Image (cartoon, rainbow, N blue to C red):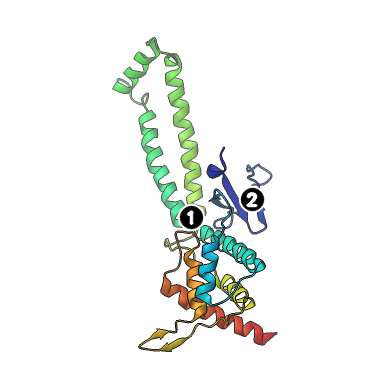
Amino acid sequence: MSRKRSLHHSAKSGMGPRVQPTRDRLSKGPPPVLLPIVTAVPNEEFKFTDSQFDQLAKMGQVKFSEKHRITLETLAQFWIDDLRVRATARPKQFEDVLETMRTTLSQAREACRLNDTVGSIGRHLLHWAMEAPVQGAATFAVAVMALEHQIDVVLGTVGELLQYLPEDEGRTRPFGDERRIIFLADIYEEAGGKATVYWRDIESGMADTPFRRFAQQFYSLLPAVDKREPGGLVRALRVALAARREQRRAR
């Protein structure tokens, strides 16, 4: 299997290889929602180009050492992973898949009930099929009955899984990037800048500070689909920097 098509599993305890559930591992209660998290593994590690580093430095009016570059790329990789996890399934999506399975499998089960009614076309078809010179035809009736039974088993499991799902209105996962922004501010200040984002006034809105430009450019380079809008990012920057100041006062 190519790396592109492989699966990447993570849980609270960290990263690990794919494991198959066994009777010993199965818990009596429902699993946490929704762990383990399953995401596609990217083709390669994310890297900034030299021109992108130059652009970031120019936006932020700072100068990055080799150490800063490595740290920024490490932060970017963690941030990308956060955004990838945020895009993973929610209970409502699981419910939609299971309901689709229940509808489709119920229809398939009905299609398997060829032998239910005496004199029906279905029963006639079964007798005709068992006499046909076709591979597997002799056991066709038994195979259809076995399939119907297996569908019943799966439908029972689907019903129980639906009961285990928590209530969910289908909202996406919240952004959890405050600590990433704080770390970004730390790197920025190590490189000689001053991490500031503030409200200027009602007419002009947020001040166009070097850190704001740098942070927005850094965030725009992250290859993820489900990201904050520019205005949402600026608000997140303000909240994170305020939390950072509180952390420093508490030390």
Along the line of sight, which residue is nearer the eye, 76 or 102? Answer: 76
Name which residue type carries label 1. Ala
Q: For residue 134, say whether it is visible.
A: yes
User: Circle 1: is it few (<14), some (14-19), or many (20+) Cα within 10 Å?
Assistant: some
Seen at 48% across and 72% down, the residue is: 216
Along the line of sight, which residue is nearer the eye, 12 or 27? Answer: 12
On screen, residue 98 versus residue 187, left or right, reads left
Dot 1 or dot 2: first in sequence order is 2
In percent of width and height, residue 50 lies at 55, 62
On screen, residue 67 versus residue 171, left or right, reads right
Vertical placement of 95 versus 138: above or below? below
Q: Which residue is mark 1?
A: 89
In percent of width and height, residue 106 lies at 39, 38
Q: CA distance from mark 1 to mark 2?
A: 21 Å
Seen at 52% across and 57% down, the residue is: 84
Seen at 64% across and 44% down, the residue is: 19
Under circle 1, the secondary element is loop
